Image (tube, helix red, strand yellow):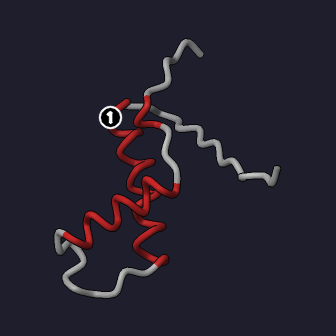
């Protein structure tokens, strides 16, 4: 596909939770309780949409991996 992957394209739940924590500390949730739905799910969707907009892509493929036990 001749595409060079960027570091910002890779994100973990740790990065998502860190972003939500920073937003909460800056008052973006207006003092309301942060909840998994909708706050975490919206953060994930926003990241996907932002990548698609920045790259001006027609199709965005998303790989979801599961952490397996060792």
Picture residue at 50% right of the left edge, 39% below the top: 10
**In the structure shown, which secondary structural element does the residue marked by tag 1 occupy?**
helix
Q: Residue furthest right?
A: 70
Picture residue at 28% right of the left edge, 87% below the top: 32
Q: Is residue 68 left or right of residue 18?
A: right
Q: Is residue 36 left or right of residue 31?
A: right
Circle 1 Cα neighbour tier, 10 Å, few/some/many (<14 / 14–19 / ≥20) = few
Picture residue at 22% right of the left edge, 85% below the top: 31
Q: Is residue 56 left or right of residue 64?
A: left
- Taking depth in this image into account, of 65 and 15 the one nearest to the observer is 15
Picture residue at 39% right of the left edge, 40% below the top: 51
Percent from the top left, x then y, of residue 55? 37, 30
Percent from the top left, x then y, of residue 20? 35, 65
Percent from the top left, x then y, of residue 30? 19, 82
Does residue 55 lie above or below 38 as drawn? Answer: above
Q: Which residue is mark 1?
A: 54
Percent from the top left, x then y, of residue 13? 52, 57
């Amino acid at each position: 596909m001749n595409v060079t992957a960027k570091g910002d394209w890779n994100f973990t739940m740790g990065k998502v939770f860190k972003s939500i924590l920073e937003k909460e500390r800056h008052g973006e949730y207006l003092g309301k309780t942060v909840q998994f739905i909708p706050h975490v799910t919206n953060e994930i969707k926003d990241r996907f949409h932002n990548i698609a907009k920045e790259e001006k892509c027609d199709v965005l493929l998303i790989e979801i991996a599961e952490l397996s036990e060792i």
